[in-house]
Image (cartoon, grey):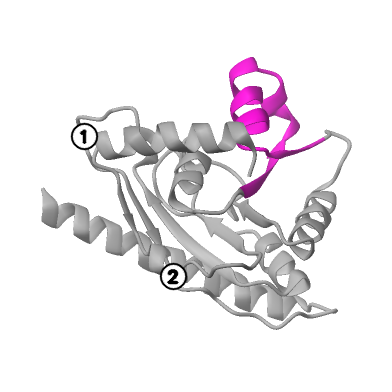
Amino acid sequence: MPFLYKIGVALVRVWCRLCGCRIRGRENIPADTALLIIANHTSYNDPILLAVAFPQHITFIAKEQFLRRSHTRWLYGAALGAVFLNKEESDLSALRTSIKLMKGGRTVGIFPEGRRNFDQKISEFMPGAAFIALKAGVPVLPVAINNSRDLLRFWKRNVAVNIGRPILLEQATKTSQEKLAEKTACFQQAIKDLYIENEHLLNISR
């Protein structure tokens, strides 16, 4: 695990405790194996929260646009160790990069919605996560993140991360559209259920 990653995670972990961030389901994280972590995406804080929630180093696949600003270049590149894709590279290149990393024993984190949803709702998932999971043959861990945009608003105390049970898939050399659609729907439903659990617990604690 990169030194800056360790330091960054340690600092954010302290902040999460101060702002009352709830992290549930750590007992569901398999040890000593590569994983594909999938989560909903509502703010720039989502990768940071995933890094804090998991004991292993997560490699995020990031767009080249994050290299344009010094703070995001440092955060996602130096601290989080993200893999940046050149603008000439296609989405297929991102998928291949993810598969290669996981076959090499790395844990990869992606956001199947493909973009941030500022309305805090979960939108339709793209089939990329299912394609990666079937090709790499690694456990898929669904994660729901609620109110990540409020991570710096410590007085709200409403940030929650819910880690679900691993979804085990057999490695497949060929993937049909039907299979991808089936697994994509499965992933989306798993995260929706975890998201609703978070909302319920947050409402109870208020």
Q: Per the image, is 72 magenta?
A: yes
Considering only vertical position in the picture, is 78 above or below 32? Answer: above
Identity, as a three-letter code, of the amino acid under mark 1: Lys
Span shown in magenta: 58-85
Residue shown at the point (51%, 45%) measured from the top left: 51
Residue 156 numbered mark, or none:
1
Across and down, in percent, residue 112 comes to 60, 56
From the viewer's perspective, tell me whether residue 65 is left or right of residue 116. Answer: right
Total labels: the figure holds 2
Considering only vertical position in the picture, is 199 above or below 34? Answer: above
Q: Residues within 10 Å of mark 1 (few under 14, many from 20)?
A: few
Give the quarter of the figure containing the N terminus: top right
Q: Is residue 44 visible?
A: no
Across and down, in percent, residue 199 comes to 26, 56
Dot placed on the residue nearer the N-terminal end, 1 or 2: 2
- Please tell me which residue lies in front, 6 or 159: 6
* Mark pair 1, 2: CA separation: 27 Å
Residue shown at the point (59%, 79%) measured from the top left: 168
**Which residue of the protein is positioned furthest toward the right in this rendering?**
88
**Under tag 2, what secondary structure?**
helix
Residue shown at the point (16%, 54%) measured from the top left: 203
Across and down, in percent, residue 186 comes to 53, 74
Residue 28 numbered mark, or none:
2
- Residue 5: image quadrant is top right
